[in-house]
Image (spheres, rainbow, N blue to C red):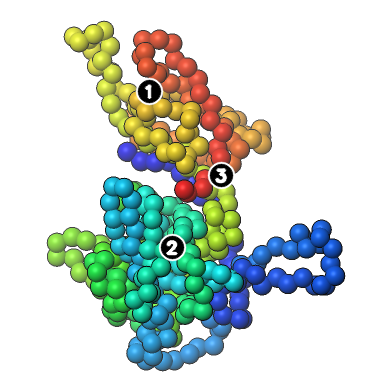
Amino acid sequence: MKKIFSFLLLFIAAISTTGCLNLNSVENKDNNSNLNEQNEVKNEVVLYQSSNEVVTSTVEEAVAKVYDSVVVINVSSVYAAGSGSGVIIGEDDTKSYIITCHHVIAGATSFEVILSDGTNLEATLVGGDEVTDIAVLSIAKTGLNCASFIEDSHDVRLASTAIAIGNPLGTLGGTVSVGVISSTNRMIQMSDGTMKDLLQTDAAINSGNSGGGLFNVAGELIGIVNAKYSATGVEGLGFAIPANTARSIATGLIEKGYVEGRYDLGVTFADGYLREGGFFGTSKKVVYISEVDKNGSCYGYLAVEDIITNITVSYKDNEKDNSILSSITESQDVINFFNSLELEIGDSITFTVRRDDYNANPIQVTVEIKQYIYN
């Protein structure tokens, strides 16, 4: 069973020469500007990143530079609790912003950040993006040490030093491990079946490291740790989201609370059997809805146990012919169908479904694709 989603690439954040991410860097040009002019002034997000100058240092010096920027993240919900890591990437006048992995905060309703000095702070979710596995939290404290993104993570070199700092096992906050960059662009299939282009390192990575920082010997943030390969006899296969991706997604989440253009149908398709003609009747293989996410476009339209018999996609620009899937025998047929399309916000999907009384005539349900906002 898989959720269907798509994504668009985002812009790269502007370079900052002042240090931390700043949400209030735009000043009024004239103190006598009228109200309308003031209303036109917009906040600008600038992420702190390094210059082109190569700064050499020892591992000890690099760790001393960035150690306080890495935090412990504890999350909880009515069902469970968990721990991960995060990195402080900037601030505005009242808040500091912390990047982490989406899977660290997914499903949680409360968030706690523990600074390197042991200070506990309540955190607020700014936004999350499941596709890239990036999320941002904020805390009501400023003046903290901010990590510096490398200017371009494409410049990360094979076999260069990699320093991971995080909270392995959820109990060992501030742990430092050192290795090398084993691959600069490794395509990895995640447990949900999606493919991600990641940095690979042999620095020790364990559960709880997710969301922590991967730094180079200059103390620049080159990636956000998000995965390891776990199997008997396997060692030294850790992975991180490249800084370019992490920075651009974090910028969108801080500015808007979501990634522009992202959508999620919010339904899970499953294979099943429908018995027709009573207890001794024949069984027919069908595809049905096993889950509906309240954040997805289909929430309020499709229902759990709806049987899908036909799908028609209509495009908002009216320049493309409708896409139709009429022969549906397996959930993978539906997944492949949606993955083959380039859908946009505003396109619509008409599902023909059998609901409740499966002997009754099918009904049609039309869903408009909406901007996805994780909540």
Q: Which of marks 3 and 1 is nearer the N terminus?
A: 1
Query: Disc 2, disc 3: CB below 8 Å?
Result: no
Residue 186 visible in this rendered orientation of the protein: no
- Amino acid type of the residue that numbered disc 2 sits on in the rendered structure: Ala
Residue 374 visible in this rendered orientation of the protein: yes
Q: Quadrant of residue 214?
A: bottom left
Secondary structure at numbered mark 1: strand
Q: Distance between the residues labelled 3 and 1?
A: 25 Å
- Looking at the image, is 288 positioned above or below residue 63? above
In the picture of the structure, the residue carrying the numbered disc 2 is: 123
Q: How many marks?
A: 3
Give the x, y percent position of residue 364: 50, 20
Give the x, y percent position of residue 192: 33, 48
Q: Earlier in the sequence, mark 2 or mark 3?
A: 2
| Dot in front, 3 or 1 | 3
Q: Quadrant of residue 339?
A: top left
Relative side of 196 to 127, left or right: left
Categorize mark 1 by other alpha carbons within 10 Å: few (<14), some (14-19), many (20+): many
- Amino acid type of the residue that numbered disc 1 sits on in the rendered structure: Ile
In the picture of the structure, the residue carrying the numbered disc 3 is: 371
Secondary structure at numbered mark 2: strand
In the picture of the structure, the residue carrying the numbered disc 1 is: 307
Q: Distance between the residues labelled 2 and 3?
A: 25 Å
Give the x, y percent position of residue 237: 26, 68
Q: In which quarter of the image is residue 156?
A: bottom left
- Looking at the image, is 356 positioned above or below residue 28? above
- Amino acid type of the residue that numbered disc 3 sits on in the rendered structure: Gln
Q: Which of marks 2 and 1 is nearer the N terminus?
A: 2
Quarter the N terminus occupies: top left
Secondary structure at numbered mark 3: loop
